[in-house]
Amino acid sequence: MAQGKTLWQGLAQGWLRLHGRLPLTYHHAMGRFLGWFMRNVVRYRVDVVKENLEQSFPEKSAPEIKAIHKKFYTHFGRIFTEALWYGSCKGDSGRKRLKDSHIVEISNPEEFNRILRDNTQVMILQTHAGNWELIGGILNYTYSEPLLLTTHTFAITYLPLHSQFWDRFMRENRDAPVRDMDFDGYIPTNKIVRHVQEHAGKKFCYCFITDQFPYSYSHKHTVEFMHRETPTMTGGAALACRMDMAVVYLRFAYREDGGYRMEFVPVTEHAGSLAPMDIMKQYYKLLEEDLRNQPWNYLWTHKRWK
């Protein structure tokens, strides 16, 4: 047994792995139940979600807010169960299952490929919309033109968890489809600058989730977002400006059939000519557009306005 793993942790990991092999339809049903359970029984942050929705959509009536609140928790439950299913998509057979599921479809791979061909490095700015836990399978989500990426030219930043066991479990789950392909692109936030410097001049794509509350309380920048002054992280944008990367926003929307659609929205192809806050203002403008279209499709449990 791996160092630091208790018997109960090992049993929990084994159960989760076996459970993940059940069909995606089962996980969607379980996601609906889990969402109901979290909202009505556990009541996990229900007041935080309600306040965030009321403040962000003051034009909506109480019944409309209630409907969005309910739909959000269905989405919230699906995030967990889909991620569990996704973690079982390993090896050739797992990648085929992932691709055949059409759980995510990229609508414009040709636009991303054009940007990557024309630029040395690309920064993808992602949000907590759609199911961000599935980003590691991005090479499997095209059904026309494949992305001009490989497991050696793509990296995702993350903030390590305090528990070493669960941090390892989550990393293994997130890169399940590429774990047997020598993928080492999950980079802790405190090591990303060195990684970028080491790969300067090489074709490379980085993905930052950058809508959390800022990690540093001493360097706050704010943007107008959903009717409020919102503290924003600028690390990804600042790095893109420093290295003159191209920047794209990753739109991650629900499809009517229950899956997701990714779309790459260009922000700039010369970040070096802009200030980080110029990029973040455009980022939050695009995010707000997405939330107007699908207000439940966001992680409203986070305390973004502290």
Image: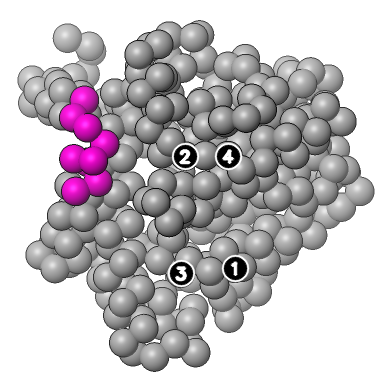
- What is the spatial separation of the Cα atoms under label 3 and label 4, in whole angstroms? 21 Å
Point out the tag, 2 or 3, that comes first from the N-terminus: 2
Q: Could you say where residue 111 lies in the image, as x and y percent from the top left?
A: 75, 39
Label pair 2/3, CB-CB below 8 angstroms:
no
What is the secondary structure assignment of the residue under circle 3?
Answer: loop
Q: Residues within 10 Å of mark 1 (few under 14, many from 20)?
A: some
Label pair 3/1, CB-CB below 8 angstroms:
no
Residue visible at 67% across and 66% down?
Answer: 285
Q: Quadrant of the N terminus?
A: top left
Whether residue 192 is visible, yes or no, is no
Residue that carries the numbered disc 1 in the rendered image: 288
Point out the tag, 3 or 4, that comes first from the N-terminus: 4
- What is the spatial separation of the Cα atoms under label 4 and label 2, in whole angstroms? 7 Å
Q: Which residues are magenta?
A: 21-29
Point out the tag, 4 or 1, that comes first from the N-terminus: 4
Residue that carries the numbered disc 2 in the rendered image: 104
- What is the spatial separation of the Cα atoms under label 1 and label 2, in whole angstroms? 22 Å
Q: Residues within 10 Å of mark 4 (few under 14, many from 20)?
A: many
Magenta region, main secondary structure: helix
